[in-house]
């Protein structure tokens, strides 16, 4: 069984992320970098639920794994673009060439689909 303090802190983190992500998405219309921070926090929230899902809902753990695996590939590019957006001298504008940073998400989704059918 997972330590109750770990469960409490995990749920606290996930609750904070659930409050923060909608606010960041609302602000993303003015400043694009908030979208990347919202993606990063969403990914962190999904990954933080590992112990909770494993202990509380073991029958759903394989579905959680399928969802969490591609999330790993969202973290680095999202954090990169957030930092690039807040440190840029001029307003950061998304360009098509930036999508290359998210290229590994597509194979990860493919692998997750294969894991789902195993």
Image: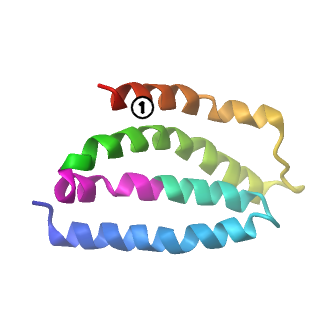
Report the residue that reaches farthest toward the left: 1
Res 25 → quadrant? bottom right
At a point 38% along the width and 38% down the height, the residue shown is 66
Q: Nearer the viewer, residue 83 or 14?
A: 14
Residue under numbered circle 1:
112
Which residue is at a point 23% across and 66% down the rendered structure image?
6
Which residue is pictured at 46% across the width and 55% down the height? 44
Q: Is residue 99 above or below residue 39?
A: above
Q: Give the quarter of the figure containing the N terminus.
A: bottom left
Rate crowding at label 1 as few (under 14), some (14 to 19) or many (20 or more) other CA atoms within 10 Å. some
What percent of the width, then of the height, locates residue 115?
35, 28
Left or right, 5 with reference to 98 = left
Q: Depth check: 1 or 80 in front?
A: 1
Q: Measured from the top left, where is residue 20 in percent x and y?
A: 56, 72
On screen, residue 35 above or below 97: below
Up-down relation of residue 98 to residue 64 (above or below): above
Which SS class for mark 1?
Answer: helix
- In percent of the image, x 41 and y 38: which residue is there? 69
Specify start and end residues of the magenta stretch as a single range.
Answer: 44-58
Is residue 45 located in the magenta-colored stretch of the structure?
Answer: yes
In reply to whether residue 37 is colored magenta, the answer given is: no
Locate residue 88 relative to residue 43 in the image: left or right.
right
What residue occupies the far front of the structure in this picture? 117
Looking at the rendered image, the quarter that the C terminus falls into is top left
At which x and y percent is residue 117? Answer: 34, 27
Principal secondary structure, stretch drawn in magenta? helix
């Amino acid at each position: 069984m997972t330590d109750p303090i770990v469960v409490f802190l995990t749920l606290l983190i996930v609750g904070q992320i659930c409050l923060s992500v909608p606010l960041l998405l609302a602000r993303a219309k003015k400043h694009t970098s908030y979208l990347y921070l919202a993606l990063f926090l969403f990914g962190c929230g999904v990954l933080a639920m590992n112990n909770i899902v494993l202990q509380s809902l073991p029958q759903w753990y394989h579905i959680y794994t399928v969802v969490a695996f591609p999330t790993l590939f969202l973290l680095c590019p999202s954090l990169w673009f957030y930092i690039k957006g807040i440190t840029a001298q001029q307003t950061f504008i998304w360009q098509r060439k930036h999508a290359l940073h998210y290229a590994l998400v597509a194979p990860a989704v493919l692998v997750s689909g294969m894991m789902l059918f195993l």
